[in-house]
Image (cartoon, rainbow, N blue to C red):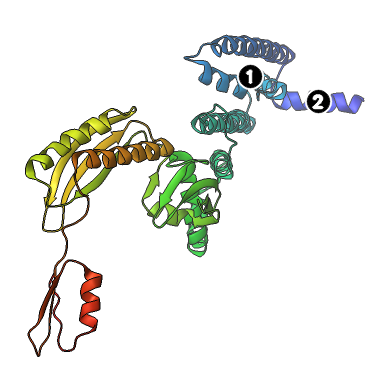
Amino acid sequence: MNNFYANVHNFFASLDITLPNALFALGAAIASYILMHGALILFRRRLGRLSENRQHGTIAQVLSKTLARTGTLAILATAILIGLSVLDLPQPWDMRLGHLWFFTLGLQVAFFLHRAVKIGSRRYFLSHGRKPGGVDQQVTVAHTVVIWLLQTTVWVVFLLAMLSNLGINVTTFVASLGIGGVAIALAVQNILGDLFASMSIAVDKPFEVGYFVAVDKFSGTVEHVGLKTTRLRALSGEQIVIANAELLRQTVFNYKRMTTRRIVFALRASPDTPPALAAKVPGLLRDIIAKHDKLRFDRAHLKTVDQNWIEYEIVYTMLTADFDLYMDTQQAINLDIMQMFADQGISAAPRPQHLLLQEAGEGREVHSTDKSAANEDAGTTSGTRYMKH
């Protein structure tokens, strides 16, 4: 025991620390611990009250949960370092104390950022992935990978900063990591392409699980967005698996985010319709379409006139994206148009076709408006037959 006290006395003597200086440093450490612990408690209570405010609630909750990572050991280590800092330590202890300061504060900051990235990212993904019914979607694998990459970046930066603070040249190490990273990236570029495409889908959200989308020749409801592939459930029942990178290279039609539906359809009538009656049809079409709810009539025009038919182009806009309502409305409009044609005496049949059949030997001609009768008559004759439409 005497040897222990003697060794302690010799150690403090070598550092030129007197008993009053040691007691002063101890008092500074205790006071610092009490002040930091009390300030942390008061700050967390203040954040708790701010979290109830809707305007600052999200930031306050993230800060409050992040500060929960501040342990008693970290406060104690910081207080001891404050106590040692009031002492005039000789070299190399003064330099070593600086390294301890950097390690302690850097480690605590890394813990704070690690926690803040996890909490903030999860809250962001959940808030931007809320379903229409108000139920939060689960954080997908892509979201987890994004969080993991951010947290890994925090710790890599802390490690490199710590090595640099200790006097180690990290330039060569960083260059080696870069060369190795390029080699790995070239080896697995397809997998990495799908992985980064998955992260892009998770952050940018061109579509989400449950949305109906169409890509190239495929369409279906999004069932799962994974690290490499996205799975769609087609209307016919089969599952479609598309690589994420290939998916983002295509034009994606997102029908879930459709708010209106523009409808363009054509209506044909016989070219024998009198001009006065043909001029009345656009107004009658306006009356038929405008009486339906949740749509806006845009226009109806006589677009085409040729020898076979006259064609009207009708355009209206559904004020809702409901496909079933659109089909019900279009069906009702078609039935009303059929009734309107019947009431006005307008025929939807094209102009009859006239066929000319001629025998080479006798010069006999047959005119008919009935294709089947003309064909039967042509079948009983010999020679060359000419058909004129």
- Position of 196 with respect to 18 (left or right) is left
Amino acid carrying label 1: it is Ile
- Residue found at x 23% / y 76%: 375
- Position of 6 with respect to 15 (left or right) is right
Q: Nearer the viewer, residue 56 or 218?
A: 218
Q: Nearer the viewer, residue 369 or 339?
A: 369
What whole-number distance in Å separates the C-alpha atoms at marks 2 and 1? Answer: 21 Å
Q: Which residue is mark 1?
A: 82
Q: Which quadrant is home to the N terminus?
A: top right
- Residue found at x 49% / y 45%: 199
**How many labels sit on residues?**
2
- Position of 86 with respect to 271 (left or right) is right
Q: Position of residue 179 (x, y in %)?
A: 48, 59
Q: Position of residue 237 (x, y in %)?
A: 55, 53
For the question of whether residue 140 can be seen, the reply is: yes
Q: Nearer the viewer, residue 228 or 75?
A: 228
Q: Secondary structure at mark 1?
A: helix
Q: Position of residue 142 (x, y in %)?
A: 55, 44
Q: Quadrant of residue 333?
A: top left
Dot 2 or dot 1: first in sequence order is 2
Q: Secondary structure at mark 2?
A: helix
For the question of whether residue 159 can be seen, the reply is: no
Nearer the camera: disc 2 or disc 1? 1
- Residue found at x 52% / y 56%: 240
